[in-house]
Image: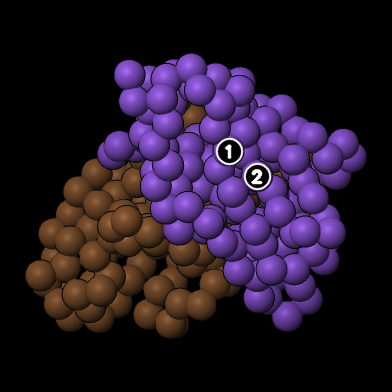
Chain colours: A purple, B brown
Amino acid sequence: AQSVTQLDSQVPVFEEAPVELRCNYSSSVSVYLFWYVQYPNQGLQLLLKYLSGSTLVKGINGFEAEFNKSQTSFHLRKPSVHISDTAEYFCAVSDWSEATGNQFYFGTGTSLTVIP
Amino acid sequence: ETGVTQSPTHLIKTRGQQVTLRCSSQSGHNTVSWYQQALGQGPQFIFQYYREEENGRGNFPPRFSGLQFPNYSSELNVNALELDDSALYLCASEGDRENEQFFGPGTRLTVL
């Protein structure tokens, strides 16, 4: 089974500063990787995903992430944050095995707070 | 708006009762997944259905069961409710070629 570790539970950052939210997963065997954002009292919205191909993935709202297979990491970055980026961010991994079928694993989340 | 709806939005039950939560997927999406999200935690995968067959299940006991219907709706049933079942329950639908899940707003279940 996979495990997904989001290394920072809370990240405060000043408006217009860059930010990196870190994510590591346990196994590099054929996985798909995702970042989701969740605003208060709402469902999850996909920011970006890595399925294959280029290791640098660009998503919505100016976010991007880099897949690093050797370090089993998928860190999320934004060069300049806005107040509206304040939310909870989740890293997720999906894989498949004959024994368990499709599986999805989420990290515990990183709370991003943008300070004016 | 993801086109995925869930009902009810909130629900209060007592320990030992049974509950059914409902999800309406995007039209044409043959895959639906259900998740449990406890307060302050990430979503935990319960199971996934594809064309009315279960094709993946997380580490949840058998009292968590599901159904998917041909009209792109689905249900999550939980028997013998426990206090720890209190959580936000999310469903997500996925098209056959998208590798992207679209989440509903969730049902907040409180077990007293």
Q: Which mark is residue A75?
A: 2
Would you call the spot at circle 1 few (<14 residues within 10 Å), some (14-19), or many (20 or more)?
Answer: some
Q: Position of residue A24 (x, y in %)?
A: 65, 58
Confirm or deny contact between disc 1 and disc 2 (CB under 8 A). Answer: yes
Q: Position of residue A89 (x, y in %)?
A: 47, 42
Taking A83 as reference, is B5 above or below it? below
Amino acid marked by disc 1: Glu
Query: Which residue occupies 80% across, 64% down?
Result: A28
Which quarter of the picture shows residue A52? top right
Q: Is residue A3 left or right of residue A13?
A: right
Query: Which residue occupies 48% across, 17% down?
Result: A16
Look at the image and tell me whether residue B103 can be seen.
no
Q: Which mark is residue A20?
A: 1
Total marks shown come to 2
Look at the image and tell me whether residue A108 can be seen.
yes
* Quadrant housing the C terminus of chain B: bottom left
Q: Position of residue A35 (x, y in %)?
A: 59, 42
Would you call the spot at circle 2 few (<14 residues within 10 Å), some (14-19), or many (20 or more)?
Answer: some
Determine the chain carrying the residue at label 1. A
Determine the chain carrying the residue at label 2. A
Q: Position of residue B102 (x, y in %)?
A: 54, 38
> What secondary structure is marked by label 1?
strand
